[in-house]
Image: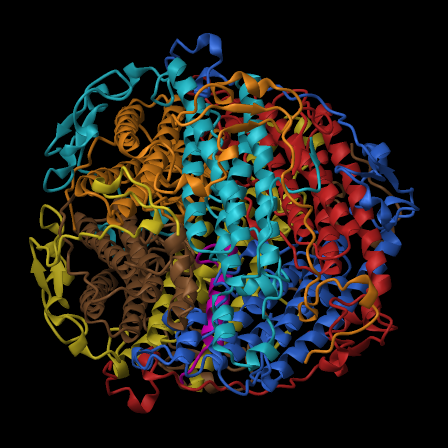
Chain colours: A red, B blue, C orange, D cyan, E brown, F yellow
Amino acid sequence: MFYHIKELQYNAKPSQPDPVYAKKLQEILGGQYGEMSVMMQYLFQGWNCRAENKYKDMILDIATEEIAHVEMIATMIAQLLDGAPAHAQEQAAADPAIEAVLGGMNPQHAIVNGLGAQPNDSVGYPWTARYTVASGNLLADFRANLNAESQGRLQVCRLYEMTTDPGVRDMLSFLIARDTMHQNQWMAAIEELEQTQGAVVPSSFNPEYEKQEVSYSFYNFSKGTESQQGRWASGPTLDGKGSFEYIEDPKSMGQVPDLKPGPPYMHGTPPEDIRAGQNPPS
Amino acid sequence: MFYHIKELQYNAKPSQPDPVYAKKLQEILGGQYGEMSVMMQYLFQGWNCRAENKYKDMILDIATEEIAHVEMIATMIAQLLDGAPAHAQEQAAADPAIEAVLGGMNPQHAIVNGLGAQPNDSVGYPWTARYTVASGNLLADFRANLNAESQGRLQVCRLYEMTTDPGVRDMLSFLIARDTMHQNQWMAAIEELEQTQGAVVPSSFNPEYEKQEVSYSFYNFSKGTESQQGRWASGPTLDGKGSFEYIEDPKSMGQVPDLKPGPPYMHGTPPEDIRAGQNPPS
Amino acid sequence: MFYHIKELQYNAKPSQPDPVYAKKLQEILGGQYGEMSVMMQYLFQGWNCRAENKYKDMILDIATEEIAHVEMIATMIAQLLDGAPAHAQEQAAADPAIEAVLGGMNPQHAIVNGLGAQPNDSVGYPWTARYTVASGNLLADFRANLNAESQGRLQVCRLYEMTTDPGVRDMLSFLIARDTMHQNQWMAAIEELEQTQGAVVPSSFNPEYEKQEVSYSFYNFSKGTESQQGRWASGPTLDGKGSFEYIEDPKSMGQVPDLKPGPPYMHGTPPEDIRAGQNPPS
Amino acid sequence: MFYHIKELQYNAKPSQPDPVYAKKLQEILGGQYGEMSVMMQYLFQGWNCRAENKYKDMILDIATEEIAHVEMIATMIAQLLDGAPAHAQEQAAADPAIEAVLGGMNPQHAIVNGLGAQPNDSVGYPWTARYTVASGNLLADFRANLNAESQGRLQVCRLYEMTTDPGVRDMLSFLIARDTMHQNQWMAAIEELEQTQGAVVPSSFNPEYEKQEVSYSFYNFSKGTESQQGRWASGPTLDGKGSFEYIEDPKSMGQVPDLKPGPPYMHGTPPEDIRAGQNPPS
Amino acid sequence: MFYHIKELQYNAKPSQPDPVYAKKLQEILGGQYGEMSVMMQYLFQGWNCRAENKYKDMILDIATEEIAHVEMIATMIAQLLDGAPAHAQEQAAADPAIEAVLGGMNPQHAIVNGLGAQPNDSVGYPWTARYTVASGNLLADFRANLNAESQGRLQVCRLYEMTTDPGVRDMLSFLIARDTMHQNQWMAAIEELEQTQGAVVPSSFNPEYEKQEVSYSFYNFSKGTESQQGRWASGPTLDGKGSFEYIEDPKSMGQVPDLKPGPPYMHGTPPEDIRAGQNPPS
Amino acid sequence: MFYHIKELQYNAKPSQPDPVYAKKLQEILGGQYGEMSVMMQYLFQGWNCRAENKYKDMILDIATEEIAHVEMIATMIAQLLDGAPAHAQEQAAADPAIEAVLGGMNPQHAIVNGLGAQPNDSVGYPWTARYTVASGNLLADFRANLNAESQGRLQVCRLYEMTTDPGVRDMLSFLIARDTMHQNQWMAAIEELEQTQGAVVPSSFNPEYEKQEVSYSFYNFSKGTESQQGRWASGPTLDGKGSFEYIEDPKSMGQVPDLKPGPPYMHGTPPEDIRAGQNPPS
């Protein structure tokens, strides 16, 4: 169960309205790696958690913080939209600066949301639950989380560069710091799990049942061997169980596929020798 | 540019048709972490790569392999659909076994695809480009790739458990092994980049511009402190630059939000004192 | 069955082209609350109607009118796109005004639709059938319809404010008037149904089977009690069967969730005591 | 900002696993009118609220409760999936009852989520932000909310009928009661706003600018006049400002549309007289 | 503008309910090539038509017919759902036949639509406007239409094979015949346009501006030359302007791509020589 | 299985960056008829092919070429984005030209992709697998392919008109030529199949089972008979088996639909005579 308090986790106070920037800021609210994604992802990972309680508790702590991040950004966007020139009188003035603002705004911010934030990304595409990851395997999911916090911090840093508004930058500096923490947090949790389970997900699958002769081979599927220069092409593998092998010219190990003609009631392309006839339905 | 050879990378030969299993196998073809996702993700990462050529080459090598994986699974699905009982005569027989098969099949496999594979997941949801990640920051993206190979191998292992068909298991044992390699490959590439750049993405953002006092604090946003027991709550942080701090009762640092009323031409809820009037359009 | 006549229901004649406004106008054509939504919603409600014929007939009358509204707006958009400057020669002139037009246009209006309307909203997101509501319960659905006409009229009024073109305004003034009628129409139909069925949907569910002690309680899930000042916090409930009660500090009534570990063949995170082992597939 | 407590708002304890029912229950978690929809809808309405504080507080109180409802249902689904027979050994037994369970399950519950809930509906379609409504006009939005609670309660009642598990029915009886409250709550808030603003949304648009001669006319767009029998076809209108009028045979009031040929650089279908020629790009 | 009459275009009377078949029938209602797609596609092509009036009229005639097809199929589905066993009492009986029906049903038909049709396909995926084609070039669009009627008739024929219900087959036999007409209709319209414009779309693009040396070459991008055996590999081209040429071993004609490093404010992977440093935001 | 070579199929070298044009160019990369669509469509048609091997080989040859086209366009877009002014310092200069560029850019090109191509269309909508067609009937699918190449070439020609950059035009002139070939290729393959199978898809359905009296009738569903002037309204049908007939005033051939009330446990609108009562759940 959840409680709300009226104060924001951190200040969200722009120095002045900027409806074009409001559109861009939607990316970290409702985009693939926006705050809505980590909020929903952590909530579902926490609620589905079948491991020790310390994991469930930790995941739900960060999930609850992320709701507050969505709240901060939504509040910021609403204020950036204050006084947006969504009005014909002002258009009539034909001021090129206003024109540029109008061209760069998300029209739905005015028409649909009445100068409010929306749960969409910076091109207006709605947030979708297919962004979330909750597999029941914590090591796999913590890697998803580390990726999400990496993509997320990268996007916030880029948005920081795109504004000079000190109030906006202040809020972003807070989000950037929290993403530093959250990257560290997931790295710590990953390290802990890898030490007990091993590095390859899932650790519980019997290796005898995998085709081990190709488990550590790098296949060079292109002309040229520049890909041989990296850590991934030689030396011990990261799971500590083998050595990388570089296969310069990988060969097929499979059959030439040859599908059977479909049954007549499928009405696919008939084989050549019966094309003249008809298959009556029965 | 690309070339095709007619042989599959590895065998895809089921022992017998199984249209219900064909539906499930769609998950690793066109699902969020199916082979189409890694294929498209690696292709775009490779084509957009602005780093040294060894990375571009490596990424496109694995991308090219993934196209072959999509090919193998599609071929497998088409064969699992051979002789699917999509016909009223057979239904008429009212055999409960056939009925169960029909109820468990994806109806589009017959109606739309004529007993062929489709670029969708196991509930028929179409693959979407929002599954792909190509940020221009390789460390961020390699974490996305490690996650994708972790989720992918987990799903293939689960599918392995759901069949006893030796031909299907043979193909899956190959895919499982390749995912072992690909997890190792991305771990190796991540290690290489972290050693030169540092662990927090992006490494190039000036830390003075982040709010450093909250960069290493774990916030306990719930009653109870089970979340204090993990590696993430104390000790040095994983980026080697700080120490985790556990905040048992985090406080708000922000304002109570208070949005201004919108302009009259937005026709939002009017403030109480002017509700009787009308705003004429101008 | 349907017939078409070539005249529009009302005039759709812009005074001059305005490709930027054409983009905005897409919202009330193919947006969440555009005319396509009410058209499809009413058609499906009518076709699925299992109540008296007067309802089916009424719903299909308004559905048929909505097809004509889609037609009017599509026709308007095509004319607003007349002569759109989608051409390099004109770009080359580097006229900032033309540049602003181009930046504010939907590029698909030229590239994909050849200066025609598209079944999408103002950010180019396609109309989706998930916008429609047809539940088989008319009181529930008429509330959906009243909402749709309220959101719709609100958006048309906002678009009216965003143009000074008298031809566009003329068409919008007609749509606004029809939405006035349609809000009244659904309010009338709701009143009629509420009088015979009661106000809570569905009326046919036995109240003994609901947990009646919480049926009229307002839960204050935040610090502070500003939410106590409204009609919803005290006095008789609107269904005439109880009194609102304000619970200032609501308490949990449920368990602390504790999920069982998953079976080994799910390959979730293994419990700590068996992490060293392996689960062979069987 | 938000806090979490570990207890659920109300019990979510099934008497026994039922993976087929788990699939159905997803509808009220991640469907168009599931708890995720009202949770996100109320959060965004609250965060965007520009009206008096009592509204913002009230909306966020109910939003915060809805997060707890999502939590309860997710927890219930995970338990309904306990011991789901997602394993070949059990399939091999070829027990028709198990076969029926497997055919009726959502395959992603096992393959993707490892026996956990997912943020999708009962056919596996992901929750999308296009389900949310936050227009900046509270009367419009409260109508959306009343609709959402009506559709929601209807679906929960139907799901109640589809199970006999007393633990599941206990949780649903709680949700049904809360939906009774929430319908009453929005009806109360609507009544309050209608009394000060009037019934037609938006109330602030100048009626002189709408085409008032068609503001109260019912158009009979079909053969036969069964639609004349309802409250919507005669008598005073619900906004108290006019009288319904029934137009038995509505006539067109608009032009026959006649679009101009497109410019040559659009490469549309050329007019007949110039089809022989070519338009060189310039 | 449109009018409705209460009679269906053709009978839609099933002999008995069949909720499992109702799910399958959704494909030709709301699927990629269902009747909703051709209805919306033809409506938009007609409304956007800038060519002679005979085309606009013809397109809107067939569009108007398609609305009636959607109506017929929706009506059929609602009747196939009559008496669907969506009730626990009946489940309790544990009759395997009922179990199979329940497993094969679309759960939303009961929970969401109350035994009514929905605007979705046979796996419950919603109809989307991205299925429609209206390019402003009639020859291109008529090819889209011929394809749509071909895919559509194929799917209806497959569905005909999947039932023995004489009432359902009667309706399908009508739809199959209309699709025969509509394939002929679009072939006729295509022939007419090709004779005046030529076969390659768009005909108005100056051929001097295309790279004509590769306009008639078949590239064999695989090992082996089975693809040489078809009409497409030799002989005169179908546009009457060239001859097919078979290139057995096509060579690259382009550069090795080499992208520049991004600017520092993008925070992509930094070049190796500056990885130690930091880019302060400015 | 596939191999990659590092050279592009043809040059992709813009003369200078143009981030606004980069946004437009996305249409032919990730749009409905972009290169990703034909790439995936042909791959799946090839892999699912159950006809003679020459078809499978031919389809996979062109599929493999299309991967190279995606590669070329992605490479072009990344270069068009070089040096995009996504930085506040430059914004601060308030140069209207830069402002116009920023307003016309896709913000995700900077924020999400770090100046790289994305698998989306020109309004940022992600590529979706619902764009692909692979029905198992080659004649149907080749018509889909002919349409795809027609829409595709039309869009590339329009994009050619929208730029004067000689490097961009050079690449487009190559794509236009290849689309000329591919239209010819599919026309040739269609001609070959129509000659052996007949023109109506599917050819294998027994015509006795279709309602032949309506197989060649044009229905005029509108006032006025302009639609009578075309090839589709009289003369022999294109399948060579009948004559077109023009029905000026088509009549209904079906029933007035009349659905039964739903069962009580569906909680639809109750019939009038039982509205007072309650249906207890059982």
Residue pictured at 73% horizontal, 69% vertical: B182
Residue B185 in the image: above or below residue E114: below
Q: Main secondary structure of the magenta part?
A: helix
Residue A250 in the image: above or below residue D269: below
Residue F113 shows up from this direction: no
**Location of residue D222 by image quarter:** top left
- Where residue E139 sits in the image (x, y, percent)? 29, 59
Q: Is residue B189 left or right of residue D9?
A: right
**Does the magenta run of residues contain C278?**
no
**Location of residue D241 by image quarter:** top left
- Where residue F258 sits in the image (x, y, percent)? 18, 52
Extent of the magenta region? F29-51
- Quadrant where the N terminus of chain F sits is bottom right
- Where residue F125 sits in the image (x, y, percent)? 50, 49
Q: Nearer the viewer, residue B168 or E270?
A: B168
Residue pictured at 43% horizontal, 40% vertical: C208
Residue C229 shows up from this direction: yes
Residue C200 in the image: above or below residue D98: above
**Does the magenta run of residues contain F44?**
yes
Q: Is residue E66 left or right of residue A149?
A: left
